[in-house]
Amino acid sequence: MSEQTLPNPMPQGNVVSRIMYSRYTRLILILVFAASVLLPIVFMATTSIKQPIEIRESGAILPTRGIFTENWGRAFANVPLVRYLFNSTVVAVTSTLLALLIAVPATYSIVRFRTGGMVLPSLILGTYVMPPIVVSIPIFMMTRIAGLTDTLFGLILLHGMANLPVAVWLIDSYIRSLPVELEQAAWVDGYGRFETLLKVVIPLIRPGIVSAGMICMILSWNEFLFALILTYSDVSHTFPIGISRYEGEHGLQFGEMAAAALTGIIPIYLIVLFFQRYLVEGLTQGGVRG
Amino acid sequence: MAQLELRNVSKTFGDEHAVQDLSFTCKEGEFFCLLGPSGAGKSTTINLITGIDSPTGGDILLDGESIVDWSPQDRNFATAFENYALYPHFTVFKNMEFPLKAPVRAAEYSDKDRRDRVVQVAEMLRIDELLERLPRELSGGQRQRVALGRTLVRNPSIYLLDEPIAHLDAKLRHRMRGELKKIQMELGITTIYSTPDQLEALSMADTILVLNQGKVEQIGTREEIYRTPKNLFVAQFVGDPPMNIVPVQYQDGELNGAISIRLSQDDNKQRAAAVENGKLLVGFRPKDISFVSAESASSNAIGEVKVVESYGRTADVAIELDAETIVKCKITADKAPQVGEQVGCQIDQANLSFFDAETIQRIQ
């Protein structure tokens, strides 16, 4: 393993740079970062197996009074957690499909026909920049007039629309990078605009659609504010609202809450893991010259 | 089978004129070649014909009927794009089959018909081994043949081929020139073919349109384009090496400049006398020069041999007549002089071209 045969990313000579770029420094930085991300999750896991009294008393990470598994049973018994997870899944999946169904043709139209000129893309992004709480009152009123408060459908519509800008924004660059000649070839081959979108454009921007879908799903899964305003019963409560419902006679039940929270991150991780394999790069490679 | 006519077609992108006042007729079954350097407007012209772009002015007629408002899928033209435009997510087979499955003509072909056609064309283009591959697994030349194949599987009214063999290697290109011409003659389908390569145009086309900066320089048969170029641009674009152009002064039946010719034919004299001030550009093909000894009375110019490029049977010889004038001549390789040698050049007067030095237009 001589220095001549291996590419060496380290700048020579400068001692500070050498330390900065050394593999040990990198390893330490990675470990620090990983620990800072994982620590809350580890803490949550240990909290879920601590005695309620211990949680109130000590701030130690590991349980000191033995393992207490009852939190897990109670988490499911005291609150309809499964129902909330089901609601969250329905809302996340359906609102994502809704957002994508609108975002794909809308983005295509914005990119290829310059629909809305310069204004529409900025407006779309603008709606996302605005803090959601600003519109919470009108949204609540409108939902109530439509009779959709405390329904999953109302939340689906809202999440779908709220995540639309994100989906448009993510899909935009994928459509932009698609060589327009591929579409032109399809027209000459006898396909109309819409058929071309279905058979040529959508298969080729699939990674973009999948990543947009994953982001929308995560955003919907984690959304708290509108779910709080628009749902008032178990029929439509989603998981983040459910977490806030672990109140007992002695205040918040942190152990049960930790167990529920851990349960709640599992489905969304599974969904993301499942879709990750569709994030194939280089799908458009080889189509056009140069 | 169809006749295509463009009438005063123009296309501007912003302030830029991509194509200006383009008019031509491509007759039924004709092999029509758009010849011009890159940026001349060849691809724009093809896109206007296919309907990918709409002209900003003028009309396009198919068999006398205006098609300028028709969508591309209704025109039933087949195109091979210069940059291939293969569908990257389809195999070679599916790429070639795609136009046959289009809604506008899906009913015409059964599954078996489609497979047979694709395989037949693939065999002809020698890509039948590659049918299950994806475009990214192919070399540039193979991709270009797939693009061509996707065009040829169809039975369109017109083929539009945009530099379809430009990126093949020399040997394959040579073979494909012959193959394409053969296919076109067999099918008898009107073909519009764009190329920057004058040799391709001369070897394949029935009619050549020389395009430069969006304007027509000349339309004619390959004979006309080669023998009687309408202006200096055509003269210097067509032919390899291109036509030699030498500025001369005409007086009393004699051309004087870097070359001196006493005109012996009356029609040459007439043409040379057509310009009042006598300032002419005389043009002659490299093949119309022959070598004589430097002392010979029949030589029209004397110069030093600068470069000899031998191609086996023939050789191109560059001769410096004076500081500003180098002429090239094409001779059989065994008669090539040595570099540095002083030679006399004799110019065949039968094929002289005359251009007005000011307008650079041909004097007929």
Image (cartoon, helix red, strand yellow):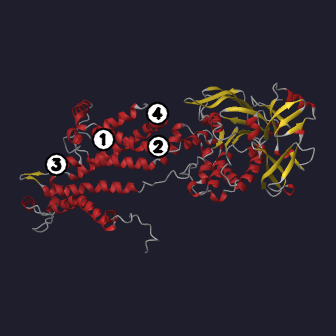
Q: Nearer the viewer, residue A155 or B227?
A: B227
Q: Nearer the viewer, residue B271 or B279?
A: B279
Tally of numbered tags: 4
Q: Are marks 3 and 4 on the same chain?
A: yes
Q: Earlier in the sequence, mark 1 or mark 3?
A: 1
Q: Chain of mark 1?
A: A
Dot 3 and dot 4 residues touching (CB under 8 Å): no
Residue A33 can be seen, yes or no: yes
Image point (18%, 57%), residue name: A258
Q: Which mark is residue A159?
A: 1
Q: Which mark is residue A244?
A: 3
Image x and y of residue B129, in percent = 65, 60
Question: Type of residue at label 3?
Answer: Ser
Residue named by callout 4:
A114
Q: Is residue B104 left or right of residue B286?
A: left
Question: Type of residue at label 4?
Answer: Arg
Image quarter of the N terminus of chain B: top right
Q: Mark 1: give few (<14), some (14-19) or many (20+) Cα within 10 Å.
A: many
Image x and y of residue B92, in percent = 60, 53
Q: Chain of mark 2?
A: A
Image x and y of residue B246, in percent = 79, 38
Give the secondary structure at mark 2.
Answer: helix
Residue named by callout 2:
A175
Q: Residue furthest bottom?
A: A1
Q: Which mark is residue B304?
A: none
Disc 4 to disc 2, C-alpha distance: 13 Å
